[in-house]
Image (cartoon, rainbow, N blue to C red):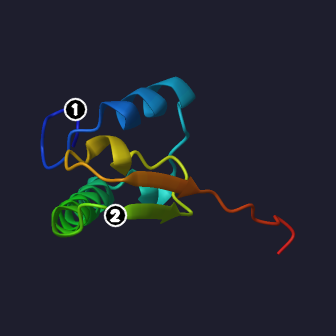
Amino acid sequence: MSQQGIILNDRSAERIWKEEAFPIHGKSRSKWLAYNMTIRARFFDDWTDRMLKQNKDALVMHIGCGLDSRYMRIKTSYAEWGNCLIAVDSTI
């Protein structure tokens, strides 16, 4: 979606996707899943942008975000943005 300029523009995600060459199998290859994920990201980007406009001194804590680059897509200024990655025990 991003490469075509549809819904979301995320050059960082495009670069990561190209460099890492993640394998996609089965239902994950669905173009409808890609549209759904893109629309979801855009919805949360827009919501985050509105909240930051209402709260100029906001501290955003992005929990379990993984490779998410929302902080680079948001254009509204914010006091601070922190990413909190969560280590998961693979034996669970």
Nearest the viewer among 65 and 53 is 53
Please name the residue shown 20% across and 50% down the image.
Answer: 76
Residue 89, quarter of the rendered image: bottom right
Q: Is residue 12 left or right of 50 when viewed as pictured?
A: right
Q: Is residue 70 left or right of 25 when viewed as pictured?
A: left
Q: How far apart are marks 2 and 1 (CA)?
A: 31 Å
Q: Give the crowd class for mark 1: few <14, some 14-19, many >=20 residues within 10 Å.
A: few
Expressed as whole percent of the image width and height from the top left, the position of residue 35 reads 23, 57
Q: In this view, does 38 lie above or below 50?
A: above
Q: Give the crowd class for mark 2: few <14, some 14-19, many >=20 residues within 10 Å.
A: some
Expressed as whole percent of the image width and height from the top left, the position of residue 40 reads 27, 65
Q: Which amino acid type is marked by label 2?
A: Ala
Report the mark closest to the observer, 2 or 1: 2
Numbered circles on residues, count: 2
Please name the residue shown 44% across and 56% down the image.
Answer: 28
Residue 49, quarter of the rendered image: bottom left
Q: Is residue 8 left or right of 79 when viewed as pictured?
A: left
Nearest the viewer among 23 and 92 is 92
Nearest the viewer among 54 and 88 is 54
Q: In which quarter of the image is the C terminus?
A: bottom right
Please name the residue shown 48% across and 63% down the image.
Answer: 61
Please name the residue shown 41% across and 27% down the image.
Answer: 15
Disc 1: which residue? 3
Expressed as whole percent of the image width and height from the top left, the position of residue 71 reads 36, 47
Q: Is the C-beta separation of discs 2 and 1 under 8 Å?
A: no
SS class, disc 2: loop
Expressed as whole percent of the image width and height from the top left, the position of residue 67 reads 51, 46
SS class, disc 1: loop
Work out whether mark 2 precedes mark 1 in sequence or the reverse, and give the earlier one.
Answer: 1
Q: In which quarter of the image is the N terminus?
A: top left
Disc 2: which residue? 58
Q: Which amino acid type is marked by label 1?
A: Gln
